[in-house]
Amino acid sequence: MTDQTPEQSPATPIVALIGRPNVGKSTLFNRITRSRRAIVDPTPGVTRDRHYERVHLVDRVFILVDTGGLEAAAENTMAGRIREQTMQAIQEADILFLLLDAREGLTPTDLEIAGLLRRTDKPTYFLVNKVDGPELEQSLLPQFYELGVERLWPVAAEHGYGIPTLLEDLHDRLRPAPTPDAAPADIIRLACFGRPNVGKSSLVNRLLGEERMLVSEIPGTTRDAVDTLLTLDGQDYLLIDTAGIRRKGKVQEKIEKFSVIRALATLDRCDIVLILIDAGEGITEQDTKVIGYALDEGRACMLLINKWDLLKGDTKRQKQLLEEVARATIFVEYAPVLTISALTGAGIKRIFPVIKSVFRQYTSTFPTNRLNLLLQEATAAHPPAMSRGKRLKFYFTTQLTSRPPTFALVANYPKDLHFSYQRYLTNFFRKNLKLDKAPLRLFFRERKRRERVGPAPDAKSGGRPKR
C-alpha cells in the first residue's frame, strides 16, 4: 500500500505556510492558489487539517500547504493537536513560508517559531502580512529585523500587494516542472460523509495506515475537505475526508456553515460516497438526509456502520440495528451495508473489494439492442395502464450516460405514467442488468412528432424495431 499527496510526484516541491493563528495564512493560500478552498475566518484555529493545492508558475509547479496556527499548547488539547499537524507539514515541506502580522507586530511566539524553522535548515521566506503598500514598509518592517534575517517580504494577502514579487523569486528557486503523467483513467473517487464525530477521519487514517487526518472526540473537528491519493493492489483511489454535516438548526457557527457547503460540494467530485453511521447512536434522521444528498446527486453509496466494536457480544442489538438501517434506507436498498470499526480495524479489509464491485456497476454501459429487448420484455410481462382512454406505449430506450447508468425511455404519454410503473421498470432494469449495488436513473421522454420511430423491438428480429 502506498499513498501520496494528490497529483504530487517525488519531484514536486512542497511549500508550507507556517505562522501563529489568525495571521492570514488561509487568505494567502487562497491568493496564491487563486481559489477559495481554504476557509478564511478571523476565529483562531479555523484551519485544522493540512490543506494541499497544486500551483503552477509558468514552467514550475509546487504543492502549497495551508496549516493550522502554531502556538504553545498542551498535547491533549485541540491547539496541541493542530500544532502536531503543523509540525508534520513542516517535516514534509521543502520550502517554508513564515507569515507574520504587521499590524500586531513581532511577538514572542513569532520568535519561537522562527527559531524552530531555522533548526530545520530548510529555505524559509519571512513574509510580513497586512502591508498594504510601499508607503507602509518603512514604518511596519523594521521591528521584524529583530528576527535576524537578511530579507523580509512585505505582502498583503487580502489585496495582493507583494505577491507577484514573492512568486517570481520562488519561481527562480524551484526546479522546472516534470512532464506530468496522465491521470489514471480508472481512479475511484471516494468521499467520507456522515454526522460529526462518527469516525470519518479515523476511517481515512485506518485506510491509509497513518495519522493523516486530525482525529478528535470533539464534534466538528474536520472543517475542510482534504484529498489523499491511495494506490492499493494496482488500483488508484482518491480519498476525500469531509466536514461532518449537522442538522441545519445546529449549524450555528459561520465556519460550520462554510464546511457544510464544502462537504456537499464534494459530491460533485466523487464517484462513491462512504456514509458512516454510528453503531452506538444508531441510524438517525440526519443520516438519511445525508444519504438523500448523495442520492440526489446520483452518486453510488456504501453504508458503513462504524464503532461496531461497541456492540461486541450483543447479538440482539446487532440484529436490531441492522433491521433499523434496512428500514430507514429502503430508498437506497441497493447500497451495500458493512459493519466496521475504524478504531480496531475490524471489517476494514472488506471495504475495498465492495468498492470495486460498486464502481464496476456505477460505470457500466450497455448496448442499445439489449436495452430495447429488456424494455419489450418488461412491457410484455406487465403492460402500462390506460391513460385517458389511450394505451401508453414505449417506443425505444437508450443509455444517456454512466456514473450512474442513465437511460432515456421514449413513450407517447410519459407524463401520465404512474410512479408505481416507473418503479417497476427501474427494478426490472436493475435486476436484469445486474445493477444490485449501484444507482440507475430512468428518464421518460415524449416522442417528438417529427420522430418516425417504430414500436418497441421484437425479440425475434434481434432487437431491431418493427417497421
Image: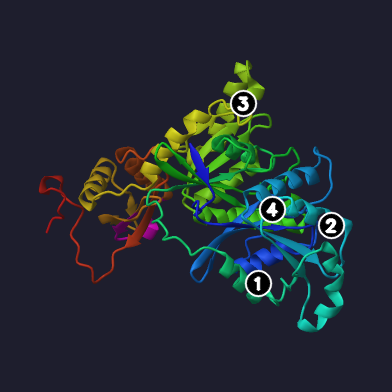
Label of residue 111 in the image: 2
Q: Which residue is mark 1?
A: 166
The disc, 4 or 1, on the residue closer to the chain's N-terminal end is 4
Please tell me whether mark 3 or mark 4 is closer to you in this view.
4
Label of residue 121 in the image: 4
Magenta region: 407-418
The disc, 1 or 2, on the residue closer to the chain's N-terminal end is 2
301 vs 160: above or below: above
Look at the image and tell me in which quarter the C terminus lies. bottom left
Q: At 47% from the left edge and 45% from the top edge, which residue is drawn? A: 237
Q: Dot 4 lies on which element? A: loop
Q: At 57% from the left edge and 35% from the top edge, which residue is drawn? A: 209
The percent position of residue 403, horizontal first and vertical second, equals 40, 51
Q: Dot 2 lies on which element? A: helix
Residue 113 visible = yes
Residue 27 forms part of the magenta stretch:
no
Label of residue 344 in the image: 3
Label 2 is placed on what type of residue?
Leu
Label 3 is placed on what type of residue?
Thr
The disc, 1 or 3, on the residue closer to the chain's N-terminal end is 1
Q: Dot 1 lies on which element? A: helix
23 displayed left or right of 246: right
